Image (cartoon, grey):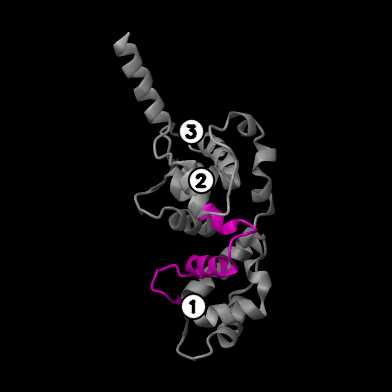
Amino acid sequence: MRAFKGCFSLKQSRKRRGHEDPIILASETPFTINEIEALYDLFKKLSSTIIDDGLLHKEEFQLALFRNGSKQNLFADRVFDLFDVKRNGVIEFGEFVRSLSIFHPNAPEVDKIIFAFRLYDLCQTGYIERNELKEMVLAVLSESDVTLSNDDVESIVDKTMLEVDLKGDGKIDQEEWKEYVAKNPSLIKNMTLLYLKELTLAFPSFIVNTEVPDWK
């Protein structure tokens, strides 16, 4: 009987690998406890589509975004890299919640602006350089199924650099990026996911099954 209990406990710990206290996560993010429990339900489903180990792998992440785990996508790669705070090639539940919280409608706008900047900062130098901007422009065009000549792409990049690079040093820093976003707020429109305020409607079972009262 004792051996059975030990086996059961081991299975439970494996299932909840990387699971953090929802009360702590709720105190650090705009999510309520019920919403975090709902996110855990979603995370379990996503993290078991290919490898059932309680961790979200890049292929599973891409599968969730594009229904195709083998599709190469610069945006998916960059978002995955930013969610993978520990940089160990997988996303744990705590990383998933804290990173996703930036997309919450109640998250501070400055957090969204900085996340978007880091998305474009492909080489993680603290600046967005011209070649990085061009790569992101090409990625946007590819996702939109729009084909432009190389001259047109270069023109877009040159015009953008001229508008954003106020110091004229050939790169965009965070302050320049913030000013540009202030003039063009649509740049961070995709940084807000309205449905994150309705998680318990999407996963209603957790309203009943949550182990703690819902508070913020």
Task: Report crowding for label 1: few under 14, some 14 to 19, many 20 or more residues within 10 A (C-alpha).
Answer: some
Can residue 58 be seen from the camera position used here?
Answer: no
* Quadrant of res 140: bottom right
Q: Which mark is first along the chain, 3 or 1?
A: 3
Q: Residue at x 36, y 54 (%)?
A: 87
State which region is magenta. 99-128
Residue 61, label in figure: 2
Give amino acid for label 3. Ser
In the rendered view, tell whether residue 131 sits above or below residue 169. above
Q: Nearer the viewer, mark 1 or mark 3?
A: 1
At mark 1, the secondary structure is: helix
Front one among 211 and 129: 211
Residue 147, label in figure: none
Front one among 185 and 19: 19
Asked if the stretch drawn in magenta spans residue 205, the answer is: no
Residue 55 location in percent, x, y?
Answer: 42, 39
Residue 12 location in percent, x, y?
Answer: 41, 25
Residue 48, label in figure: 3
Front one among 57 and 68: 57
Residue 31 location in percent, x, y?
Answer: 58, 49
Q: Which mark is first along the chain, 2 or 3?
A: 3
In this rendering, the count of numbered labels is 3
Q: Answer left or right for 114 relative to 18.
A: right
Q: Answer left or right for 17 relative to 2.
A: right
Q: Residue at x 29, y 12 (%)?
A: 3
For disc 1, the marked residue is 174
Q: Which mark is first along the chain, 1 or 2?
A: 2
Screen quadrant of the N terminus: top left
At mark 3, the secondary structure is: loop
Task: Report crowding for label 2: few under 14, some 14 to 19, many 20 or more residues within 10 A (C-alpha).
Answer: many
Q: Residue at x 38, y 29 (%)?
A: 13
